[in-house]
């Protein structure tokens, strides 16, 4: 006998509440999406349209002038290559160090874990400052080297806390005890059991560290002198400076055209710098949400 499904009728209060929620979410979605659409549309518009403020939603006087100027610069490919090296190598080192720190701190039988956690969190609250950090990097011989972009900020305390909480809530003590009874060593348990079960938090760590490395700008400005080592963000900054009008003598029309091009390039540079991250995010978004939800409860 077929069982008919009965639909629970929503009350008037519930419908009003859901309507308000949908309206609020729609407003938030528009507030988030519109700036992105505006930046992309502006990057494909003409310089005069951008400067005059005629771009609102769709490109006006479609033009690729901004991208032509950006990719015509010889340092763009070098900057992209350097940023990829810093991002891939830096993310690999950072994720590895974070896992090796967070997993032992999540084990209840690890002696002194609470004391070590206090010292780790202490560095989150108190920072030595720019000058002491620069002196340390200089004494280690990392000035004007790729390692200056990777080692100083290799481990983030916030990521350690999230990973530690994930391991505490996901890897049960019964699983650890069962592996010890089978003669499994700690390293083998970490690589054979913990890491395969920790794909969500690893995706979170990869995305966080990769975005941080890709957008790294200030460290490059301080530690790197050779243009061949500059990341993409520093190259884009230099392009904007070179195409900005200065106090030198030039005709008004030329100055106006240069200023319009500089305004257009700002939007093109944002798209160029953000595109790799926007391409990567959909592939890790599912694990990212799961990992953040599990690791967000601080223990």
Image (spheres, rainbow, N blue to C red):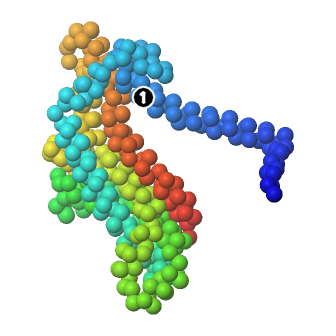
Whether residue 207 is visible, yes or no, is: yes
Q: Would you identify the image quadrant in which residue 26 lies?
A: top right
Identify the residue shown where x is 27% and y is 18%. Answer: 258
Q: What element carries label 1?
A: helix
Q: Would you identify the image quadrant in which residue 79 lies?
A: top left
Identify the residue shown where x is 44% and y is 57%. Answer: 204
Residue 109 is situated, as x and y percent measured from the top left of the image, at 48, 85
Q: Is residue 215 left or right of residue 242?
A: right
Q: Would you identify the image quadrant in which residue 68 lies?
A: top left
Identify the residue shown where x is 74% and y is 41%. Answer: 18
Residue 131 is situated, as x and y percent measured from the top left of the image, at 29, 55
Residue 135 is situated, as x and y percent measured from the top left of the image, at 24, 59
Identify the residue shown where x is 19% and y is 64%. Answer: 140
On the rendered image, what quadrant is the C terminus found in? bottom right
Disc 1 target residue? 39
**Residue pushed farthest front?**
1
Q: In this view, does 191 lie to the left or right of 112?
A: left
Q: Which is more toward the observer, 211 or 4?
A: 4
């Amino acid at each position: 006998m077929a069982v008919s499904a009965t639909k629970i009728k929503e009350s008037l209060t519930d419908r009003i509440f859901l309507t308000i929620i949908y309206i609020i979410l729609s407003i938030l979605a528009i507030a988030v999406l519109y700036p992105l659409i505006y930046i992309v549309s502006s990057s494909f518009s003409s310089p005069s349209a951008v400067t005059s403020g005629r771009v609102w939603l769709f490109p006006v006087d479609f033009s690729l002038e901004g991208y032509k100027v950006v990719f015509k610069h010889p340092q763009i490919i070098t900057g992209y290559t350097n940023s990829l090296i810093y991002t891939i190598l830096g993310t690999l080192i950072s994720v590895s160090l974070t896992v090796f720190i967070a997993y032992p701190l999540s084990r209840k039988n690890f002696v002194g874990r609470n004391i070590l956690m206090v010292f780790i969190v202490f560095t989150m609250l108190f920072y030595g400052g720019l000058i002491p950090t620069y002196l340390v990097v200089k004494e280690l011989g990392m000035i004007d080297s790729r390692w200056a972009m990777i080692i100083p900020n290799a481990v983030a305390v916030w990521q350690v806390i999230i990973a530690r909480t994930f391991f505490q809530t996901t890897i049960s003590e019964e699983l650890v005890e069962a592996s010890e009874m089978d003669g499994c060593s700690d390293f083998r348990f970490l690589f054979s059991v913990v890491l395969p079960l920790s794909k969500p938090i690893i995706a979170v760590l990869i995305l966080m560290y990769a975005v941080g490395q890709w957008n790294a700008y200030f460290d490059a400005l301080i530690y790197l002198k050779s243009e061949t080592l500059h990341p993409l963000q520093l190259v884009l900054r230099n392009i904007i400076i070179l195409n900005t009008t200065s106090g030198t003598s030039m005709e008004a029309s030329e100055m106006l055209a240069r200023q319009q091009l500089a305004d257009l390039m700002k939007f093109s540079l944002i798209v160029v710098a953000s595109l790799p991250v926007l391409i990567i995010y959909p592939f890790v978004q599912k694990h990212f949400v799961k990992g953040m939800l599990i690791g967000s409860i601080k223990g």
